Image: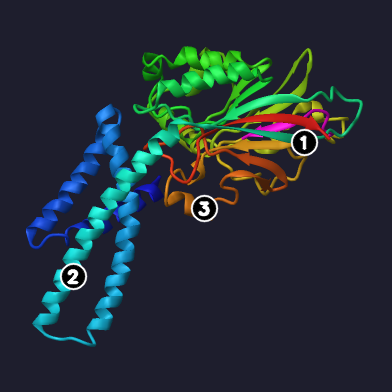
Amino acid sequence: MIFFFGLLLTAIVVLYLNISRTLPGKGGKLLALGFLLGIFLSMTLRDGVVGAILLTFFTIWMCQALWMFILLDVFLMGRFFWLSHKMTGSGYQKSSANFVCKSTRGVLIASILLALILIGLGVPHNADYQVRTQDVSLKTDCDSCGSKKPFTAVYFSDIHFAPLFRTAKLERLAAQVDSIGPDFVLFGGDLSDVNTATMDEWGYGPLMAKVAKSAKVAAIAINGNHEAMQERNGSNTLAWLRSNGWVTMDDSTACFRKVGVPEVCFTGRTDFQVARTRGTERKPLADLVPQQFKSDSSGAYRKVSPWILLDHQPKGIEPEYSGILPDFALSGHTHDGQFFPGNLIIGLVWRLAYGFGMLDGVHWLVSSGIDSWGPPVRVGSDTELWVLHFLYR
């Protein structure tokens, strides 16, 4: 959080210094202050529709303006050092000042136009999530233990209920999951950016309950870092999910079995930010291994059922853990960068920023989420729902 605010402050300083050069005299400074006032108002009013619309524009614009102004500043510095050896006197100074004024003004206009284009393209793209299907191979350590029947899970994360969230998307999700009829419905955290009372007011409870009822065995949910924000404000998102038919996991493990469906064990981790908000530590994974994996009094483990891990942030397995590993793990959080230029740099932040891969010896899926945080804009990434067919090979 401190890093985020430090980054925001740096961005504001860079934007102010550049915008203040777009007009001569006090005009540039007043224009820069006007933009900063707009940013402040959008953040203050973000819980309402008007504020959320303003925040969408200013967030997208800031991200575009920053990289454009930084490139311009690098160019202007190079130009200054080159011309300082070629020209001297007041003529050079006046020419240089005029060039800086015109170029920064041009970049400001270009950044606004680019932001509007990205919003125009990204809002409908965010609303239309993709349905992706994948087979996942599993194995157990003994042929005689349990059933080897395949099973299906629907997985989504990062729904981020907010003033600009479209109810039609949740209605489509509820209908689509119901038509699939999976054995399990899995939610990977970051449910809402508003409190539970607001979710009830918007009518999201019955729709989330419908999603949960679509599961033949269980609908399972974990928390994400945005649940930490809601907990700080006194809102219990996991309790709200439980009241709407979901099984919630908070550094806990449970195994589920139903006629026609094999026993499957799930571990849901407490999000790192939630643990910090509570002033606690996450339980070590060693404490969360399914108890039925213990084969004898020596404490040795044998995997007799599939074990699936849900952890909102894809940070992998803690390095001090050396025990039996989950068969598969699911995360979200990264949004695959969400929009340009974030989609180009997200891979520098996370070992596995999106899709299927290996983290610390575990097969892992990182979803880009079914919606977006802040601006409901996707450019260079998709919103998505996963249909996972678990098979024994």
User: Residue visible at 20% across and 48% down?
Assistant: 35
Viewer-closest of 380 and 55: 380
Amino acid type, label 3: Val
Report the residue marked by disc 3. 349
Of marks 3 and 2, the one in the foreground? 2
The magenta stretch is 302-310
Instruction: Tell me which numbered mark, 2 or 1, is placed earlier along the sequence.
Output: 2
Please provide percent x and percent y for residue 263: 77, 21
* Left or right: 234 in relation to 69: right
Q: Distance between the residues labelled 2 and 1?
A: 61 Å
Indicate the secondary structure of the residue bearing disc 3.
helix
Please provide percent x and percent y for residue 13: 25, 56
Report the residue marked by disc 1. 137
Of marks 2 and 1, the one in the foreground? 2
* Left or right: 381 in relation to 58: right
Instruction: Tell me which numbered mark, 3 or 1, is placed earlier along the sequence.
Output: 1
Amino acid type, label 2: Phe
Viewer-closest of 340 and 197: 340
Which disc number belongs to residue 99?
2
Residue 372 visible (yes or no): no
User: Residue visible at 48% across and 12% down?
Assistant: 206
Q: Distance between the residues labelled 3 and 1?
A: 28 Å
Indicate the secondary structure of the residue bearing disc 1.
strand
Residue 43's quadrant in the figure?
top left
Please provide percent x and percent y for residue 107: 25, 59
Which disc number belongs to residue 9?
none
Q: Residue furthest right?
A: 144
Question: Is there CB contact under 8 Å for labels 3 and 2?
Answer: no
Indicate the secondary structure of the residue bearing disc 2.
helix
Instruction: Tell me which numbered mark, 3 or 2, is placed earlier along the sequence.
Output: 2
Q: Residues within 10 Å of mark 2 (few under 14, many from 20)?
A: few
How many numbered discs sit on the rendered protein?
Answer: 3
